[in-house]
Structure formats: C-alpha cells, structure tokens
Image: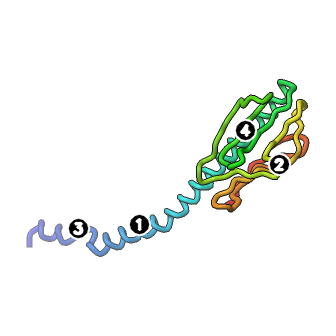
Amino acid sequence: MGMDDRRSRDEGGWTLLELVLTVSLIGLLAALAAPSFHQIGERLERKLTLDSLASDIRLAQREAESREAVTELRIDPSGGGYRVVRGGKAIRRASVRPRYRLTSNYPSGRILFRPSGQVRGGTVWLERDGKRVGRVVIQVASGRPRVEVDP
C-alpha cells in the first residue's frame, strides 16, 4: 500500500444518509416556523392599520384645537375607511384593506372633537371576518388614542 491509498481511507466526509437526514431536519424546522412568520405578518399589518387610525385621531384633535372649530372623524357606514372633516370639508381620507372593517361605539360612527380638543371617550374596533382583532381606545376628555392589537 502506498501513501495515497492510506490518505483516501482516512479522509472524512458526509455519507448520503447524513446529508438526507440533515436536509430533512432543515425542511421540518422550516415547515414548523412558516405559520409563525405568517401570524407575525398579519399582526404587524393590523398594528400598522390601527396606528394610522390613531395618528388621524390625533390629527383631528389638533385641527380642532388649532382652528378652534369642531372637527370630526367619520367612519364610513361600510366600515371600509374614514375621513377627517372640518366645516363640512374632508381634510383627510383613508381606507382599510378590503379584508378589514371598522366599527365603533360612537353614534353614527362620528367622533366629534370640540374646539377645545375634548372628545367623548369610546372605542373603534378593527374587524376581520366579523371577529374583532384590534381596537383604538380613545380616552375620555383628553382624546388620547391607545392602540391594542389582539394576538
């Protein structure tokens, strides 16, 4: 036996069985992790939608205070969007993705900000397939919105 024969027998390497098991294990872990990534994406989408609504609630409040005029955030009857209205004129419009719908406990879906910026407390819910998946809670008098996303 020569030197080259001994070296080829001592060299390490992966067997076909080891490679198959490794690839199978990686595939199994990826399959288990995929639903979690999907849920994280959906939750983030809901959070961004509610954050945008909360930002527009703050906009309506600032408009009422700075212009010293009644300002409203009106939720469309279909629940597909809303608009900020001052003096009968829409100053901001927004819509939610088609799979979502907005509802609230405000009469006719109208959140009314007085010239002082005060507002009646309440809640605007984000729904998907008739199930509530998040909400913006508007604090009494201060009008400060708080976003809550369901898991």
Of the numbered discs in the image, which one, if any, rests on residue 138? Answer: none
Q: Using residue 71 as the reference point, say whether residue 9 is left or right of it.
A: left
Q: Amino acid at mark 4?
A: Ser
Q: CA distance from mark 4 to mark 3?
A: 64 Å
Q: Residue furthest bottom?
A: 17
Q: Residue furthest left?
A: 1
Q: Which residue is mark 4?
A: 55
Helix, strand or loop under label 4: helix
Q: Position of residue 65 (x, y in %)?
A: 85, 28
| Quarter residue 133 falls in | bottom right
Q: Which residue is mark 2?
A: 106
Q: Amino acid at mark 1?
A: Ile
Q: Amino acid at mark 3?
A: Glu
Helix, strand or loop under label 3: loop
Q: Earlier in the sequence, mark 2 or mark 3?
A: 3
Q: Which residue is mark 1?
A: 26
Q: Which residue is mark 3?
A: 11
Q: Earlier in the sequence, mark 1 or mark 3?
A: 3
Q: Amino acid at mark 2?
A: Tyr
Q: Earlier in the sequence, mark 4 or mark 3?
A: 3
Say which of 62 and 4 sits in front. Answer: 62
Helix, strand or loop under label 1: helix
